[in-house]
Amino acid sequence: MRRLSLMMGATMLAVLGLVACGNSDDNQPANEVHNHAPATLTLDNGRKWQADQHTREGILGIRQALADKPAESLNDMSALGQDLQQRVKRLVSGCTMTGAAHNQLHVFLEGFMPAVDSLAGAKDEAGARETLTELHHMLEQYDDYFE
């Protein structure tokens, strides 16, 4: 039950964070909520989407934190998750991408943010390790769709 509550909270945080980004759609004001079915990542006519400098730097920082910060214990992994939350928050708040590439970034973040929140609030080591593996997999997926 507590895990469900954490996941619901994480989902709300993700939605609020994504709506706060000022470039959510070229034709839609930033403060409007999107009403659409969950999306899946797609390529740009067979090519990777071009990420802007801010996004590339943000993702690089997330990668470095995952590679450099200790993850030996539940406390380590929770601290890592909290660090990642701050990095994702900066990524979203400084968002400058527009158009379809921006929308695809948000599709990625809609899955990534709840996993980061789950790691930050993990209560058992096995679950935290599983989430950590999932985060690494998600970053590999990011590489499949963005450059």
Image (cartoon, helix red, strand yellow):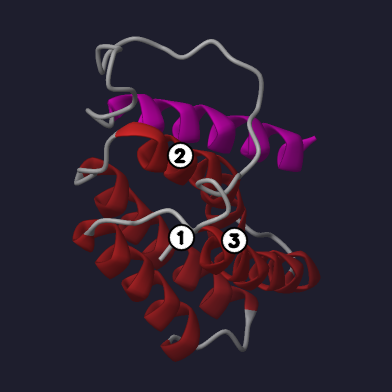
Circle 1: is it few (<14), some (14-19), or many (20+) Cα within 10 Å? Answer: some
Q: What stretch is highlighted in magenta?
A: 1-20
Give the number of the mark in front: 3 or 2.
Answer: 2
Q: Which amino acid does label 3 sit on?
A: Leu
In this figure, which residue is indicated by the disc labeled 1?
A: 146
In this figure, which residue is indicated by the disc labeled 3?
A: 119
Q: Which amino acid does label 2 sit on?
A: His
Q: Position of residue 15 (x, y in %)?
A: 47, 27
135 shown above or below 98: below
Residue at point 62% right, 63% down? 141
Q: Where is residue 45 in the image (x, y as percent from the top left)?
A: 54, 46
C-alpha separation, residue under disc 3 versus residue under disc 1: 24 Å
The residue nearer to you, when weighing 145 against 141, is 145
Residue at point 25% right, 52% down? 90
**Dot 3: what SS?**
helix
Using the image, tell me which numbered label, if any, was put on residue 106.
2
First reached walking from the N terminus: tag 3 or tag 1: 3
